[in-house]
Image (spheres, helix red, strand yellow):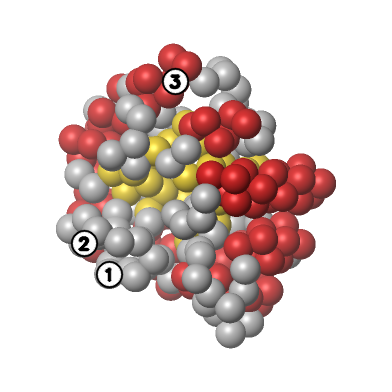
Amino acid sequence: MQALPRLLFITQEGLPVTVIQQVEEACQYGIQWIQLRLKSGTPAAKLTMAQTARSITRQHQVLLSINDDPELALEVAADGVHLGQQDMPVKQARASLPRHMIIGGSSNTLLQARQLYLDGADYAGIGPLRFTRTKENLNPILGPEAITAVAHQLQEEHHLFPLFGIGGIVAADIAPLLQGGLYGVAVSSAISQAPDRPGAIRHFLQVTNL
């Protein structure tokens, strides 16, 4: 599998800027990996949106992952799928999805992150770093020290796979997290709700390129 980009942009619903506009801007201004997060709408509406996002990302040669929905990821020939703790287990997804598909999972503890590695995940999101309204039913907030402690422990165990900080990430968090052993960050609101979204994208790309 190719090396993953260090910046993962997660789309957000319910904003003045549509999800598809977010995908278009992300591709236009240089983001190389997008996670399409669709929590509302009918299956048909989600399929249409995912097909549109896949067309845009393919045109720009940008990786597209689908949040929570392996079947939708397969249907639109996405590059990957991201699975939460309540979704299809990573081990089952790894056994049933194409070998080239990127499979990631969410974790809130060292135990969960370690299990994702053992189950064959290509990466794990670890967080939330701080409170965020992007996600309902938020897991316990970890903070930077707990997140980097997970990274260090996995390294000591030689469980080496990319860890992405997630949950309320802002640009100032990135250098300490990367220096603390994380591979990258997943960002949503700090880009999608920024007054200057193109400028925010450029800044995040710059600081994740350390």
Label 1 belongs to which residue?
131
Q: Is residue 180 left or right of residue 201?
A: left
Report how far apart the C-alphas of labels 3 and 1 lie in the structure.
31 Å
From what the image shows, is residue 67 above or below residue 155? below
Label 2 belongs to which residue?
141
Q: Earlier in the sequence, mark 3 or mark 2?
A: 3
Q: Residue at x 57, y 66 (%)?
A: 204
Do the residues bearing badges 2 and 1 touch, measured as CB atoms within 8 Å?
yes
From what the image shows, is residue 196 above or below residue 48? below
Q: Is residue 95 left or right of residue 56?
A: left
SS of the residue under disc 3: helix
Label for residue 94?
3
Horizontal and vertical percent position of residue 96: 47, 16
Residue 73 visible in this rendered orientation of the protein: yes
Report how far apart the C-alphas of labels 3 and 2 lie in the structure.
29 Å
Q: Earlier in the sequence, mark 3 or mark 1?
A: 3
Tell me the kind of residue under disc 3: Arg
